[in-house]
């Protein structure tokens, strides 16, 4: 039986960030286990943007979860965004910093944006409203970036110097000495603590989480601009129609875009796979061309398309921290579309939990303990 200080299940941004931060804390006996997962959940299939802003406008989070939670999520996003960009900058990983913009698609959305900007400014976040080509636009400042995800993950793994096991995990079991992780090849790896950063796999490994995490199917496409000029700069992230559509400017003539999830069965909720759907591709392309009609923008057919499975908590608040009833097991999932930023910040916070038993980065309102009543049965 192999023994480590920390076992990390998952090799996405959360797991690798945790391994890298643990190494910086002086914890060197780390094992990364990569479960056999479907390609739709692979981090490298993401569109490659990071942002301080939430996918949905902040007004939704404030209305649904309250100002304290909304403020905490934005602060954690800010921590992750800053750390991720510093990491990329120090290693010359290609990245471009841009603005977050929201284009009003209706009078109702314009009213929502006005309320959102008022809340953001009152709470110390940069935001403004302006007119652009007779459209109302919300600006959230230099709060977005496009970057090379694959290279970022490679650097994190290399610098963490962790042992890697390419295997699937069957079970996690705590005992008086630590935690045993049983693998598909019937071997057992033991550790003093385990970090479950495998997102969808958490539901299978930790039954108490089964009804608290929900799959969401999504897709994104890459288009070339064949006519007209985008009113966007590389690195910019743009939303419209209450965030039902989004686009990330990779280069001046390349756009990665997604949305229209409402065209999927049950809006993609509880999906087990994320096939690329032609009607969604067409809807996204049409929406972008309509949005930038004044600029004469026309897009190519997609040069790349990817389906991906996101996972969200039932209360739409990220889950990061020690598992209730067993503090040897740490969890991280449910990032609500902010995977790169929250994942990088979660890795930092989880490393703090391992090293000191508490985290300065992760507030207690993100801990799994808040969901305990949902897992209790008669």
Image (spheres, helix red, strand yellow):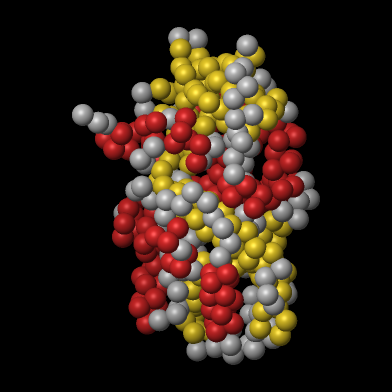
Q: Is residue 338 left or right of residue 159?
A: left
Residue 105 versus residue 90 in the image, above or below: below
Residue 128 versus residue 9 in the image, above or below: below
User: Number of callouts in the render?
Assistant: 0
Which residue sits furthest top? 176
- Of 261 and 103, nearer the camera is 261
- Of 222 and 86, nearer the camera is 222
The N terminus - image quarter: top right
Residue 273 coordinates in the image, percent (x, y): 52, 51
* Res 28 quadrant in image: top right
* Res 2 quadrant in image: top right
Q: Residue at x 63, y 22 (%)?
A: 185
Q: Is residue 306 left or right of residue 107?
A: right
Residue 372 coordinates in the image, percent (x, y): 31, 33
Residue 36 versus residue 133 in the image, above or below: above
Q: Answer whether residue 189 is visible to the viewer in this image.
A: no
């Amino acid at each position: 039986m192999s023994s480590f200080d920390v076992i990390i299940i998952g090799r996405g941004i959360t797991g690798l960030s945790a391994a890298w931060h643990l190494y910086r804390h002086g914890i060197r006996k780390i094992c990364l286990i990569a479960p056999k997962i479907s390609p739709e959940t692979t981090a490298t299939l993401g569109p490659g943007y990071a942002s301080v802003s939430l996918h949905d406008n902040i007004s939704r989070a404030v209305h649904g979860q309250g100002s304290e939670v909304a403020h905490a999520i934005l602060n954690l996003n800010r921590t992750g965004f800053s750390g991720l960009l510093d990491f990329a900058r120090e290693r010359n990983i290609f990245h471009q910093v841009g603005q977050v913009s929201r284009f009003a698609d209706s009078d109702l959305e314009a009213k929502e944006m006005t309320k959102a900007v008022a809340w953001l400014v009152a709470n110390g976040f940069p935001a403004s409203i302006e007119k652009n080509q007779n459209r109302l636009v919300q600006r959230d400042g230099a709060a977005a970036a496009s970057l090379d995800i694959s290279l970022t993950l490679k650097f994190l793994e290399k610098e963490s110097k962790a042992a890697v096991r390419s295997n699937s995990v069957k079970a996690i079991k705590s005992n008086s000495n630590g935690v045993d992780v049983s693998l598909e090849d019937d071997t057992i790896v033991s550790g003093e603590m385990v970090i479950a950063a495998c997102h969808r796999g958490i539901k299978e490994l930790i039954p108490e989480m089964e009804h608290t995490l929900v799959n969401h199917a999504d897709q994104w496409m890459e288009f070339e601009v064949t006519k007209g000029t985008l009113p966007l700069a590389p690195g910019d992230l743009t939303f419209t129609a209450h965030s039902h559509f989004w686009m990330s400017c990779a280069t001046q003539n390349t756009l990665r875009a997604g949305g229209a999830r409402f065209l999927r069965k049950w809006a993609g909720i509880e999906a087990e796979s994320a096939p690329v759907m032609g009607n969604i591709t067409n809807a996204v392309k049409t929406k972008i061309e309509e949005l930038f009609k004044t600029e004469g923008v026309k897009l190519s057919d997609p040069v790349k398309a990817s389906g991906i499975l996101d996972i969200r908590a039932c209360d739409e608040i990220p889950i990061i921290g020690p598992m209730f009833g067993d503090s040897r097991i740490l969890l991280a999932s449910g990032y609500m579309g902010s995977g790169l930023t929250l994942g990088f910040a979660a890795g930092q916070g989880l490393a703090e939990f391992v090293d000191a038993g508490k985290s300065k980065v992760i507030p207690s309102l993100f801990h799994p303990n808040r969901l305990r009543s949902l897992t209790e049965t008669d």
